[in-house]
Image (tube, helix red, strand yellow):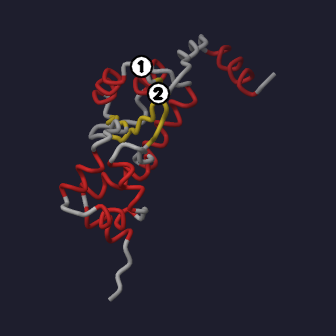
Amino acid sequence: MSMNSALKARLAARVPVRDAAPPPSFSGAAVALVLRPAEGFDRSRVSVVGRLRAAGLSLQAAHAVITRLAESGIAVTAIAEDADIPALARDLAALGVIAARARPRDDAEIAAIRARHRLSQREFAALLGIDPDTLRNWEQGRNRPDPAALSLARVFDAAPRVVTEAVLMRLA
């Protein structure tokens, strides 16, 4: 008898115990969902776990998400791409959890970011730590930036000083 079934048997001797329904399963593509606690987040709320289970997480995975949220203030989990993610986000917001996911790629975004900051391709490539030909290929649609490079460009767009201080080395 496993430890879980022994515990279940002892509990059943005192109170009625029912098996939890298995979580919905999904196959196919998953979306990374980043969760952060909002004002009023209560890690003991069973409803958050229930809502995550309804979205396809196992009980163990949903519990791990709640624990990570409480301990570190952020949790990342995979949700089925075909799940109703906007409804999930609304439901979680009502329970004190903010949900976000990666923005979709926009093939013109790199060129637009560079133009907003009035940088040449050579200058922008130097800031991103890439070859100017790579940047040119992205902007001309021959290749696409990988997610990390696109994220760095987006952070630069939002906070150029943060990126330049983190990436570049001061000489004096």
The foreground one among 93 and 56 is: 56
Residue occupying image coordinates x 32% and y 40%:
107
The foreground one among 113 and 36 is: 113
Q: Amino acid at mark 1?
A: Ala
User: Which quarter of the image is occupied by the C terminus?
Assistant: bottom left
The foreground one among 166 and 133 is: 133
Q: Quadrant of residue 36?
A: top left
Q: Percent from the top left, x then y, of residue 43?
A: 42, 36
User: Which quarter of the image is occupied by the N terminus?
Assistant: top right
The residue identified by callout 1 is: 83
Residue occupying image coordinates x 32% and y 36%:
98
Residue occupying image coordinates x 30% and y 61%:
121
Q: How many marks?
A: 2
Label pair 1/2, CB-CB below 8 angstroms? yes
Q: Amino acid at mark 2?
A: Ile
> Which secondary structure, mark 1?
loop
Q: CA distance from mark 1 to mark 2?
A: 7 Å
- Residue that protrudes farthest toward the bottom in the picture: 172
* Above or below: residue 136 compared with residue 107: below
The residue identified by callout 2 is: 79
